[in-house]
Amino acid sequence: MSTLVISEPVGRAWAHIMESYSPATIEFAGTLIVQLIFFWVPCVIYMSLDALFPRFSERHKIQPAPKQPTRSEILDCFSVVLKNQVISTALHGLMIYISTLAGKGAFRVDASIPTMHEIIRDLFISLLLREALFYYSHRVLHHPRLYPKIHKIHHRFTAPVALAAQYAHPIEQIVANILPITIPPQLLNSHILTFWIFMAYELIETTTVHSGYDFFLNAAKMHDLHHEKFLIYFGAIGVLDWFHGTDGSKMAAKRKAKGSAAVGKGVSEDRNGSVVKGDKSD
């Protein structure tokens, strides 16, 4: 398959967009539209379930009602997320301006349509690179010197909601939320359409894992546990958590070993007690 299988009207629409606007305008406006649609729409859907379908919502919530954020916390979350997105958009505009002056854009913005093979390849590699960038930047933010000043803001929500996906310090928003998504496609010199597909997927993924619901085979469970326990599940897809032992397995093994030791100690003490009692009775 030499080209992405799309309908002719879509192909003509893309060609018309390329003829009507500059690559810089297309990259800026298109990225902003993807951000608005694929972040805010899932947020509205997930966060409206409480009001529209309360029984359904309660049945699928991972954490109990007493841990859920209050109305004032949600409003604060909305304010912080809005500010972060304004900062992100401004920085994106500045980067496009600089790259335009340099004569080389961050992505390929042309009338061609990437092949299906290219899209799948770039998405797969970008997914792995994003996991590495997110995992290690996330672990760094948990360092004792950085956590209280930066990452603690995000962990205000021990029972996260979709909107809290971008509830973060501006530094974290840039380092852990934006760069791990934008850098991989740039390194691959991906087509802007491929980048938008990747960005849309990541936005849906992050709002879903912060939703607090057990949907999609409990996709939110790992990150929900991270918000609750802090030092497990730093990644998104789990590969590096497994590699570094931060997937909860070591913690579970330690608890099991501790429990076994405690049981063994108890049995030993019981036996010793029996012997003492026996001696006394004798």
Image (cartoon, rainbow, N blue to C red):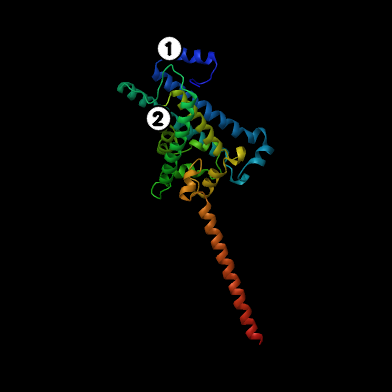
Report the disc number at residue 128. Answer: none
Residue reaching furthest to the left: 102
Q: Is residue 187 above or below residue 66?
A: above
Judged left or right of residue 244, residue 52 is right
Mark 1 → mark 2, Cα distance in angstroms? 25 Å
> How dense is the environment of label 2, judged by Cα within 10 Å: few (below 14), some, or many (20 and up)?
some
Task: Name the residue beneath numbered marker 1.
Answer: 19
Closer to the camera: disc 1 or disc 2?
Answer: 2
The residue drawn where x is 43% and y is 29% is 86
Percent from the top left, x then y, of residue 26? 43, 19
Percent from the top left, x then y, of residue 172? 42, 39
Res 101 → quadrant = top left
Residue reaching furthest to the bottom: 282
Which of the pair 175/245 is nearer the observer? Answer: 245
Which of the pair 71/67 is nearer the observer? Answer: 67
Percent from the top left, x then y, of residue 55? 69, 38
Say whether residue 193 is visible.
yes
The residue drawn where x is 54% and y is 62% is 258
Which of the pair 58/113 is nearer the observer? Answer: 113
Residue reaching furthest to the front: 1
Report the disc number at residue 188. Answer: 2
Q: Determine the secondary structure under disc 1.
A: helix
Amino acid identity at mark 2: Leu
Res 174 → quadrant = top left
Q: Is residue 247 above or below residue 107?
A: below
Percent from the top left, x then y, of residue 135? 44, 42
Q: Determine the secondary structure under disc 2.
A: loop
Amino acid identity at mark 1: Glu
